[in-house]
Image (tube, helix red, strand yellow):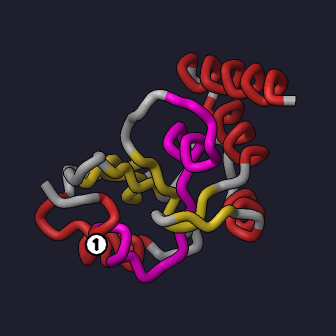
C-alpha cells in the first residue's frame, strides 16, 4: 500500500494536519487512526479537485459533498488520509491562524494544540467532544 508521506509530497497547496494524529505529532500519547488534513479552503472547487486528483491518483475514494461543492474525500494509503476542504464550525480565517502558528513535521504543517481544541469543540460531534475533554485532561496533567 502507498505510504501517506508519498501522497502528501504531491500536494502543491498549503494544508495543515488536524485531528488525532496531529496530537501524536505534538508528542501526545494518543491512539492511532487515519490522518486528517485541511487543504487550503481558499482554493476554488476546480483547484481543490485538481490538487486532490494529482496527489491521490487512483487511490481517491468517492467525494463527500456539501452545498454542491466537493467537501472531503478519503485517499486509500497507509494510514488512510482524509482530505477536507471545510472543517465544521471553522472558517478560512481559522485555517490561516492555524497555518501561521503550525508546527513543522515530517508530514507537513501540524495545527497548534489550541486550533485542534477549537476544531474538536466546533465539530459538535460526540466523539470530538470526548477527544476535546481527553486532550484537556492530558494537557492539564502535563503541567
Element type at mark 1: helix
What crowding class fits label 1: few (fewer than 14 Cα within 10 Å), some (14-19), or many (20 or more)? Answer: some
- Quadrant position of residue 75: bottom left
Residue 93, position in %: x, y? Answer: 75, 63
34 magenta-colored: no
Quarter that holds the C terminus: top right
92 or 128, nearer to the observer: 128
69 or 26, nearer to the observer: 26
Q: Residue reaching furthest right?
A: 143
| Total residue callouts | 1
12 magenta-colored: yes
Residue 53, position in %: x, y? Answer: 25, 72
Q: For mark 1, what is the residue?
A: 55
Residue positioned 29% across, 47% down in the render: 79
84 or 64, nearer to the observer: 84
State left or right for residue 140 relative to residue 120: right
Residue 80, position in %: x, y? Answer: 29, 47
State left or right for residue 71 relative to residue 23: left
State left or right for residue 46 relative to residue 39: left
Residue 77, position in %: x, y? Answer: 22, 53
Q: Residue reaching furthest bottom?
A: 12
- Whether 102 is drawn above or below 137: the answer is below
Residue positioned 20% across, 58% down in the render: 60
State left or right for residue 56 relative to residue 103: left
- Whether 138 is drawn above or below 95: the answer is above
- Quadrant position of residue 95: bottom right
Give the magenta range. 7-30
Residue positioned 13% across, 54% down in the render: 1
Residue positioned 26% across, 77% down in the render: 54
95 or 139, nearer to the observer: 139
- Whether 64 is drawn above or below 15: the answer is above
Amino acid at each position: 500500500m502507498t505510504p501517506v508521506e508519498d501522497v502528501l509530497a504531491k500536494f502543491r497547496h498549503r494544508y495543515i494536519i488536524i485531528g488525532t494524529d496531529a496530537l501524536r505529532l505534538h508528542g501526545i500519547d494518543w491512539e492511532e487512526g487515519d490522518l486528517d488534513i485541511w487543504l487550503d479552503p481558499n482554493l476554488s472547487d476546480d483547484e481543490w479537485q485538481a490538487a486532490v486528483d494529482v496527489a491521490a491518483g487512483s487511490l481517491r475514494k468517492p467525494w463527500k459533498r456539501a452545498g454542491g461543492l466537493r467537501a472531503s474525500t478519503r485517499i486509500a494509503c497507509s494510514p488512510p488520509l482524509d482530505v477536507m476542504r471545510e472543517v465544521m464550525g471553522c472558517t478560512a480565517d481559522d485555517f490561516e491562524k492555524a497555518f501561521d502558528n503550525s508546527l513543522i513535521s515530517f508530514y507537513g504543517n501540524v495545527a497548534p494544540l489550541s486550533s485542534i481544541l477549537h476544531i474538536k469543540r466546533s465539530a459538535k460531534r460526540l466523539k470530538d467532544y470526548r477527544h476535546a475533554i481527553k486532550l484537556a485532561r492530558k494537557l492539564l496533567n502535563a503541567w
